[in-house]
Amino acid sequence: MIQIDPRSTIPIFEQIFYQVRKMMILNIFNEHDQLPTVRQLARDLGVNPNTISKAYSLCEQHQLIQSRPGLGYFVLSPENAKNHAMKDFKNSFQDLFKQLRDLGFNDESIYQLVKGELYA
Amino acid sequence: MIQIDPRSTIPIFEQIFYQVRKMMILNIFNEHDQLPTVRQLARDLGVNPNTISKAYSLCEQHQLIQSRPGLGYFVLSPENAKNHAMKDFKNSFQDLFKQLRDLGFNDESIYQLVKGELYA
Amino acid sequence: MIQIDPRSTIPIFEQIFYQVRKMMILNIFNEHDQLPTVRQLARDLGVNPNTISKAYSLCEQHQLIQSRPGLGYFVLSPENAKNHAMKDFKNSFQDLFKQLRDLGFNDESIYQLVKGELYA
Amino acid sequence: MIQIDPRSTIPIFEQIFYQVRKMMILNIFNEHDQLPTVRQLARDLGVNPNTISKAYSLCEQHQLIQSRPGLGYFVLSPENAKNHAMKDFKNSFQDLFKQLRDLGFNDESIYQLVKGELYA
DNA sequence: GTGGTCTAGACCACG
DNA sequence: GTGGTCTAGACCACC
């Protein structure tokens, strides 16, 4: 289910982080579910187990999943996943708005630009 | 006039690229103007001249400025700068929209989200 | 009666060791009492029997309980449990004091810190 | 200046984290100072550069230091280091108090125990 | 079996 | 030169 693009500039471990977060938001991974084991996912994706560990550790840092040594990784809070993602998106939009304002755009013109793109 | 943030995660050469593009859009740099020399700007910003060269090369590559060997770099087309920036912004918005749609958001909810952030 | 937290970072076999020690100190387990059998406790807690064995072995190793092959495990000495726990606590405090002293704290400031926390 | 004990049960990367935090608190590392480079410290301590990276990343996660790719790691906030350490110590004391209370100790007897150990 | 740590060594981007 | 990513493979503790 998890897919990566080895040619992307985004590091593999980050891609996996986003994928796990996404699947938690889409309720494909639910609370208390066990994630694919580090070794299994490494085999499936054809990457090194350390890379998976790094991805899962990143998820754990952000309180999305939890490791139980000897057992595996388990989904902690899909709610956190959603909040985390929304925060990211809001920051991204605010960053873009700020850059546009710095370029002389007023809010009305930004609004028109965004609207045009959304319904393009 | 050009300012960089050494603590930012954005590479310095990219920051300079964006700043040059921005100053062309704001008509601070106008057509045919000469840009600061590589060495001068390197001194002013306290960075490696190679970094300035890389930034200027990036500008040239995108048809914003032009090098005249032995003389320096000169503004080519503020119009190109504006088009280039708009293309970037549109791509950024489209990327965010795509990610949100992948997370199950429909266009109406994306619209509400963006609107809420813009007039926050 | 014995409870564990599978989400804790403390290994389960250690948690069980501490619980047994605690129940001996609180006179819930008294001298000569038989402990729950390895299999029974494993079922009750939903953990691997090997984990229980490891916990009981640890208790035995510290002279808290005694195995009688073919019969089970029996409480040896609640007194030892208490002494063992006190030694642990004293070591923990001494470790913390040492670390604080290494950070430049004098005994008076440590005293104030601890007092503040105790009666917080 | 940084020292590790390879035989300790505490992972090397954590030992280094604590050492860096300590040296920031003791003003051996001051704001904006550059830390030893990853490769240099790896050579000095005789460990793998990846281990140093992991230690430094941990420091960065906790907002103690900051990486500037291509330049090195730099001290961010000795104040954060102090706050972070104090939080750790307070949690440790509270944990010990809680365990003692669970064993039937009242605050007065805990107070006497700690006082006795501190001025032992 | 599981995750966690560590080593050795390669390659890349940035300055 | 710097840090960042990734691989391959080892060893450990825990279950």
Image (spheres, coloured by chain):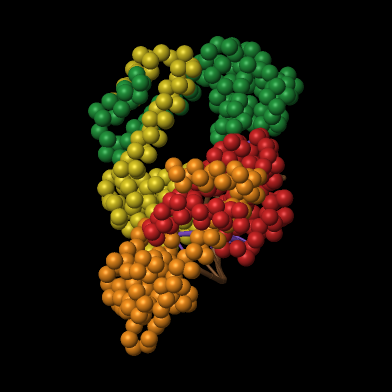
Chain colours: A yellow, B green, C orange, D red, E purple, F brown
Tell whether D77 sits left or right of C84.
right
Q: Residue at x 38, y 18 (%)?
A: A110
Q: Residue E15 in the image: state x and y as whole percent.
A: 67, 35
- When asked about the image quadrant of residue C91, the answer is bottom right
**Above or below, B91 relative to D71:** above
Q: Residue at x 51, y 54 (%)?
A: D112
- When asked about the image quadrant of residue D116, the answer is bottom right
Tell whether C93 sits left or right of B41.
left
Quadrant location, the C terminus of chain A: top left
Nearer to me, A70 or F8: A70
**Above or below, C119 relative to A38:** above
Quadrant location, the N terminus of chain A: bottom left
Tell whether B56 sits left or right of A5.
right
Q: Residue D104 in the image: state x and y as whole percent.
A: 38, 59
Q: Is residue C66 visible?
A: yes
Q: Residue D3 in the image: state x and y as whole percent.
A: 68, 55
Q: Residue B24 in the image: state x and y as whole percent.
A: 56, 16
Nearer to me, C115 or F4: C115
Q: Residue at x 49, y 64 (%)?
A: C86
Count of residue discs:
0
**Above or below, D70 relative to D9:** above
**Above or below, D65 relative to A38:** above
Q: Is residue D50 visible?
A: no
Tell whether D21 sits left or right of A85.
right
Nearer to me, A57 or C67: C67
Q: Residue at x 28, y 75 (%)?
A: C40
